[in-house]
Amino acid sequence: MGGDLAPAEIVQGGVDFAHESGRRVLFVGRPEEVEPALAGADAPRSLVEIVPASEVIGFHDTIRAIRRKRDSSLHVGIRLVRDGTAAGFVSAGHTGAVMALGKVLLGVIEGVDRPALPAPLPRRGAGYTILLDAGANVDCRAEHLLQFAVMGSDYARHLFDVDRPRVALLSIGEEESKGNDLLYETTALLRRTKLHFIGNCEGNSLFCDVADVVVCDGFVGNVALKVAEGLAEAIYGMIKDQVTTGSLLNLLGGLAMRPAFRNLKRKMDYAETGGVPLLGLKGVIVVAHGRSNAKAIKSALRVAAHAEERDLIGEIGREIGGLRAADGPHR
Amino acid sequence: MGGDLAPAEIVQGGVDFAHESGRRVLFVGRPEEVEPALAGADAPRSLVEIVPASEVIGFHDTIRAIRRKRDSSLHVGIRLVRDGTAAGFVSAGHTGAVMALGKVLLGVIEGVDRPALPAPLPRRGAGYTILLDAGANVDCRAEHLLQFAVMGSDYARHLFDVDRPRVALLSIGEEESKGNDLLYETTALLRRTKLHFIGNCEGNSLFCDVADVVVCDGFVGNVALKVAEGLAEAIYGMIKDQVTTGSLLNLLGGLAMRPAFRNLKRKMDYAETGGVPLLGLKGVIVVAHGRSNAKAIKSALRVAAHAEERDLIGEIGREIGGLRAADGPHR
């Protein structure tokens, strides 16, 4: 029920994933809306099922309303994970609501103070830089950033196959002396771990092959992410303006370049990565972009399946536990 | 003496500005280096002059070394402004050093707690969004952000001819409830002023025609600016990769699109805006990008001349004074 293109594109993405993977997909929502979408989607009947949920959580619901709508698709879907019926849950709905309910219904991994939202950013070459927290936690202390670093490393290792992820702190200069008190403190904590900590990095390093995991608080992370989204859109817009309002030569050039732009756009496109797992919850929840189409939802379901197969949750639990053990009994 | 391309490009930019404006340009630095550059630059002899300074401040100088090098080009240049010999000073050197010496040698306008570094960001349509503070002040309180808002408005009015600049706070959601304690407090202060305050804006609004002045602390502002720089570079790189490694069609398309890209690049280019005035100092100091070429230096000199002609410093003094008067005698 969540996302701008629900339910048609969401259902289509789920059906496509069922076809591709042979895994069962449960569609949680109002049967009277999901049923027709499913009928039009050429679904493999043995692999799809509707799980009824009568309520819907919207963007304007307060945190109280979110908690109270127990028969909403978010509540019902997350309970499927909690009860072991589903290996993971994907939503294109309100990220804040998904996170809030994930905490309440699944609980948080022992040793994690605050679950985090990661954002994989494409680089010029190959691969992604994982930025976290991308907006779940506005005010953070050093131990929160430390935990983000551990969870981000697990995410990079198990979902992006990075062998020994380089971890950096997002700052305003590479030197350790640049930054603020929070960063000095976090640096000291990171130096005591087995993480491959490489120091500070600046905002422009996010799109280069400098670090695999870049850690910051959710305010800074969200601003960074939105700036990147906004600028990418503005640049595409400017290119389009140039092509359509420029000379005939520009127009022809634009047409000839179309395949190149399409390639480039794909690289920057959220539909490719599809969705990100909420890190630190006791179960797999993947949030997809609100504008997700069928392709993005299929990718998000792949991420969820992948997270389960690689036991991402278990790995995070062990690594965070190791952190506490290494820190001794005084905590 | 400052900047990657000093002294040749710096001198050339100054000479070009002297030709264009008919104003006198003083070149501060080691005569043995500036002299030959000036000889090669076809300078209008009556309009140029070398002011000797034997020392140079580099990027690795400590704050103590910066203060001690009294015969450096930065010290000598800023003293020319203090003594009324020069209407303004332009440097492509170490921004932190320029700011530090500006505070010591010129002093700060009464009522300004912390001078700020603004950054004009190009939009898809016309005009610029002025982001500040772009990195001079890492930790800020609400009254600092309030002062940034006043100074940013003056800058937009007098140097970008924006009639009634819209002021927004950079946050992680448009609703007032999103954000952190600093933003709530600043919102309350801004509501009591005559500024055209429009509320919060997100990172993606920076490149749209949403606000004219966007205020944040220097940590967030610097990250935002560097993210934008890094992504713009990465996108240009990706387009280049596509053109050079793609098909013949891509290559031809790329060649045909060259004028469009050039236009676009110009729009994004720091050489167009050239430099930014440090806001809150008792005198005109303009910092230019470290990579400034002659064109960028000429633009930066134009900004300095413009700031003097429009009495930017006086305007800031009056507006900040008005803020204190409106706030009553209890302060």
Image (cartoon, coloured by chain):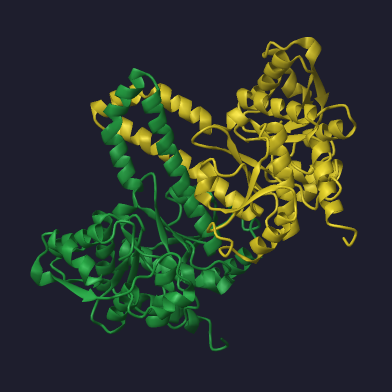
Chain colours: A green, B yellow
Q: Quadrant of the N terminus of chain B?
A: top right
Q: Is residue A33 left or right of residue B244?
A: left
**As displayed, is residue A231 above or below residue A167?**
above
Query: Which residue is painted at 31% across and 81% down in the image?
Result: A79
Q: Residue furthest front?
A: A32
Quadrant where the C terminus of chain B is found in the figure: bottom right
* Visible residue check, residue A302: yes
Q: Quadrant of residue B250?
A: top left
In the depicted view, which residue is nearer to us: B265 or A147?
B265
Q: Nearer the viewer, residue A2 or B232?
A: A2
Q: Tell me if A215 is positioned left or right of B28 in this view.
A: left
Q: Which residue is drawn at the image coordinates 31% and 73% (left, top)?
A: A73
For the image, the number of numbered tags is 0
Q: Which residue shows up at 46% across the image and 25% down it?
A: B262
In the rendered image, residue A187, in percent from the top left (x then y), is placed at 58, 66
Q: Nearer the viewer, residue A21 or B203?
A: B203
Q: Is residue B295 above or below residue B196?
A: above
Q: Residue at x 23, y 58 (%)?
A: A8
Q: Is residue B262 above or below residue B182?
A: above
Position of residue A146 in the picture relative to residue A212 (left or right): right
Q: Position of residue B49 (x, y in %)?
A: 81, 18
Q: On screen, B304 above or below A312?
A: above
Residues B296 and A321: in front is B296
**In this view of the protein, can residue A108 be seen by the observer?**
no
